[in-house]
Image (cartoon, rainbow, N blue to C red):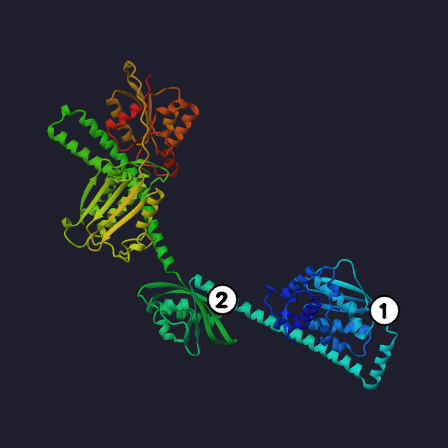
């Protein structure tokens, strides 16, 4: 808003020039020039005026009030001077200046003139606090007030500024010169003869009213413009929010049966957003079986008068299927007439796919839990089968060669079953906290055993495990999950041809920089270039529905990245693909201290062993194996009886305790021994077919335990007893 008249600016410049000052310096660097300052009827910004006045005050300190009388030529040219050169009294001159002069020339200021006596008056000036204040301007006005009586040839008024002037407010106490009443008498004569004074008052009143109306109209126009601008901003924000949230909007006009759509909605339906579309063209994208759903929802909303929400499927312009969540609201012209239906639509395809895949993940979790439980149940019978076979083989002199061979083959088969069950148990419910040195060859061999039944009908497997492959620090089961996924993906990439023509190679190696690598190479179909950038995206898959979740490679990437590794892919369409998992090598192991010289062998004696197990068959077989190895065994039927013996007065060289028992489990027995006889903890050997509860899994993760996994043979059991036995 330009609020200072150039008439006032010209008066200031004339005064400065009259005192010999450089008037051009007042506007140097400001968005002004001499023509703009001297052209009548124009205005300049208040802030520019304030800066000019500050420069004047700096150049003429303490003299700002006297500048007004310096420019005599500008004074006589000023329109206020011409108006004041009538038969007016001195108070009339001040009142006219307050009502017309300031409003005309300094619109931002408001002024009030109040007569207190014939020669005393008060003049107040206010600048809105929201404006930039200007103390020099208030000082300049003080000079104007002092010399206003001079317009009628009278002496200067005495002007005193009340204490406490600020850049926003000034109060001037005036002592007016005495005019002897000549001007007042002349004015009365003029009013009587011509009515000019009354006419002037009426004109001034009308001018005041017109100015007030103009000010109100200006304020109203400003408020209207501001409201319109704010509405445009809100509309832009709403459009931005809808676009950012991928929310489409639509309008269904019932009388014309046409639909208009936003840009987001138009992209979903393949329709331009700047035109009306027949409803049939709009609904053609909706699946035929879903169209009744949206029609029923709209009809019910019209009948009930309530908003509605539903979902339906559409076929995108690309041919892909998409799910939309739709909300609608009715617009009525009259209480009984619905004119339009307005609504929003959100693409919820990703959420629907996520729901489906999460259900699949839940089934996988359930299958993993079931696998862990099945492994536990299988390991118990395998334990006593394997133990009995070892006991029979210890009596080979009583067996025929055929029976001995049969026992050997049975034991080999059981060991194969044991390895598969152990791998299933490890990969079904991995314990993320177990991180240690991992041999990549062992991980690959376990993964190949688990995937053997799937892969052998699709491809031939070859292996190449370099002897110098470094060990890595990892969670073995999680790393095995990566290798299993890569092997399964490689088998799925094989084209329909004889199994002998399809080859999958699993290899390990040491890279030139010392890192360890696992490679899974296939000679299958390869990966198209357009698929490569999205290969590790969650839920992205090129497999048919039901054959993949799109999570496998994404999970593999996360596992490898958590190990500070990376996955590299090289592929040739119709030429095969190689996935390489690169992991940092584990730090070297500190050399072990030289063992102390062997002490003199003590006199051998039979070791005392306590066996705690709730399975009678397993308990008897373990007892038989220990007895055959020269131990004296005491059996405890379950956890409750074992607890009493383990914490009793009798001392045992070793305590063989099953982990999972229904009454008192191995965790509880370990805690009781720790309280009563902590020196016996090192003699405890826990046997387990697998942890099937969280608290047993956490217990097995302890580093201070001796654990023997079921099933086990005589040699494994005796080796474990040797580790925990203390000479008596």
What residue is shown with label 1?
A: 119
Asked if labels 2 and 1 touch by Cβ distance under 8 angstroms, the answer is: no
Q: Position of residue 670 (x, y in %)?
A: 39, 28
Q: Position of residue 221 (x, y in %)?
A: 61, 73
Is 58 displayed left or right of 271 in the figure?
Answer: right
**Nearer to me, 23 or 622:** 23
- Of all residues, the one furthest to the front in this rendering is 20
What residue is shown with label 2?
A: 236
Q: Position of residue 695 (x, y in %)?
A: 39, 37
- Of all residues, the one furthest to the bottom in this rendering is 193
Quadrant where the image shows the N terminus: bottom right
Is 547 displayed left or right of 152 in the figure?
Answer: left
Q: Position of residue 12 (x, y in %)?
A: 69, 68
Q: Earlier in the sequence, mark 1 or mark 2?
A: 1
Q: What is the quadrant of residue 261 in the picture?
A: bottom left
The answer to whether residue 131 of the structure is visible from this angle is no
Q: Residue at x 47, y 67 (%)?
A: 307
Is 49 displayed left or right of 366 in the figure?
Answer: right
Q: What is the quadrant of residue 432 in the picture?
A: top left
**Nearer to me, 255 or 600:** 600
Is 691 located above or below residue 313 in the figure?
A: above
- Of all residues, the one furthest to the left in this rendering is 401
Q: CA distance from mark 1 to mark 2?
A: 62 Å
**Of labels 1 and 2, the one closer to you:** 1
Q: Residue at x 80, y 72 (%)?
A: 150
Quadrant where the image shows the C terminus: top left
Could you tell me which secondary element the residue under label 1 belongs to? loop
Is 186 located above or below residue 118 in the figure?
A: below
Classed neighbour count for the residue bearing mark 1: other residues with Cα under 10 Å, few (<14), some (14–19), many (≥20): some
Is 302 located above or below residue 514 in the figure?
A: below
**Nearer to me, 429 or 145:** 145
Could you tell me which secondary element the residue under label 2 belongs to? helix
């Amino acid at each position: 808003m330009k609020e200072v008249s150039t008439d006032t600016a010209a008066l200031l410049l004339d005064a400065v020039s009259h005192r010999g000052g450089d008037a051009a310096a007042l506007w140097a660097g400001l968005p002004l020039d001499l023509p703009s300052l001297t052209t009548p009827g124009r205005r300049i910004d208040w802030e520019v005026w304030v800066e000019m006045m500050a420069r004047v005050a700096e150049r003429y300190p303490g003299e700002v009030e006297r500048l007004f009388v310096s420019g005599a030529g500008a004074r006589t040219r000023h329109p206020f001077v011409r108006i004041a050169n009538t038969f007016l009294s001195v108070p009339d001159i001040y009142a006219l200046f307050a009502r017309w002069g300031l409003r005309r020339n300094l619109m931002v200021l408001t002024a009030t003139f109040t007569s207190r006596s014939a020669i005393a008056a008060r003049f107040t000036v206010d600048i809105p606090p929201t404006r930039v204040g200007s103390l020099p301007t208030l000082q300049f006005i003080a000079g104007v007030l002092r010399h206003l009586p001079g317009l009628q040839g009278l002496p200067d008024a005495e002007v005193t500024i009340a204490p406490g002037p600020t850049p926003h407010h000034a109060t001037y106490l005036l002592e007016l010169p005495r005019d002897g009443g000549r001007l007042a008498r002349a004015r009365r004569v003029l009013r009587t003869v011509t009515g000019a004074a009354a006419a002037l008052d009426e004109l001034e009143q009308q001018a005041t009213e017109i100015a007030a109306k103009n000010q109100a109209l200006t304020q109203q126009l400003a408020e209207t413009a501001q409201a319109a601008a704010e509405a445009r901003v809100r509309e832009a924000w709403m459009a931005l929010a809808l676009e950012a949230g991928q929310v489409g909007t639509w309008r269904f006009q019932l009388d014309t049966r046409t639909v208009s759509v936003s840009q987001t909605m138009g992209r979903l339906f393949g329709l331009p957003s700047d035109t009306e579309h027949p409803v049939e063209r709009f609904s053609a994208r909706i699946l035929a079986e879903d169209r009744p759903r949206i029609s029923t929802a709209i009809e019910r909303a019209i009948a009930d008068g309530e908003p509605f929400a539903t979902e339906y499927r559409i076929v995108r312009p690309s041919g892909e299927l998409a799910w939309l969540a739709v909300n609608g609201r009715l617009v009525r012209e009259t209480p009984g007439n619905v004119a339009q239906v307005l609504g929003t639509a959100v693409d919820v395809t990703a959420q629907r796919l996520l729901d489906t895949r999460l259900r699949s993940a839940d089934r996988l979790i359930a299958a993993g839990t079931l696998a862990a439980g099945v492994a536990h149940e299988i390991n118990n019978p395998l334990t006593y089968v394997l133990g009995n076979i070892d006991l029979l083989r210890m009596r080979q002199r009583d067996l025929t060669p055929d029976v001995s061979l049969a026992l050997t083959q049975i034991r080999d088969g059981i060991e194969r079953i044991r390895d598969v069950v152990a791998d299933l148990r490890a990969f079904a419910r991995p314990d993320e906290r177990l991180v240690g040195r991992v041999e990549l060859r062992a991980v690959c061999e376990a993964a190949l055993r688990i995937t053997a039944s799937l892969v052998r009908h699709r491809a031939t497997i070859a292996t190449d495990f370099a002897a110098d492959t470094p060990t890595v620090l990892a969670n073995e089961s999680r790393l095995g999950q990566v290798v299993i996924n890569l092997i399964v993906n490689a088998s799925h990439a094989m084209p329909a041809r004889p199994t002998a023509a399809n080859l999958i190679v699993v290899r390990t190696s040491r890279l030139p920089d010392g890192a360890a690598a696992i490679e899974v190479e296939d000679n299958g179909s390869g990966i198209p270039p357009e698929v490569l950038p999205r290969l590790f995206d969650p839920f992205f898959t090129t497999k048919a529905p039901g054959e993949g979740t799109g999570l496998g490679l994404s999970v593999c990437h996360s596992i490898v990245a958590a190990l500070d590794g990376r996955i590299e892919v090289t592929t040739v369409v119709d030429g095969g693909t190689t996935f390489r998992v690169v992991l940092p090598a584990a730090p070297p192991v500190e050399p072990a201290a030289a063992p102390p010289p062997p002490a003199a062998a003590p006199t051998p004696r039979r070791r005392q062993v306590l066996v705690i197990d709730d399975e009678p068959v397993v308990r008897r077989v373990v007892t038989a194996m220990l007895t055959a190895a020269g131990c004296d065994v005491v059996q405890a039927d379950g956890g409750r009886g074992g607890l009493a013996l383990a914490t009793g007065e009798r001392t045992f060289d070793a305590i063989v305790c099953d982990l999972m028992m229904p009454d008192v489990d191995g965790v509880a027995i370990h805690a009781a021994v720790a309280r009563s006889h902590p020196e016996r903890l090192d003699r405890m050997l826990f046997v387990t077919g697998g942890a099937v509860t969280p608290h047993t899994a956490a217990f097995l993760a302890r580093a201070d335990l001796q654990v023997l996994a079921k099933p086990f043979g005589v040699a494994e059991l005796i080796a474990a007893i040797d580790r925990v036995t203390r000479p008596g």
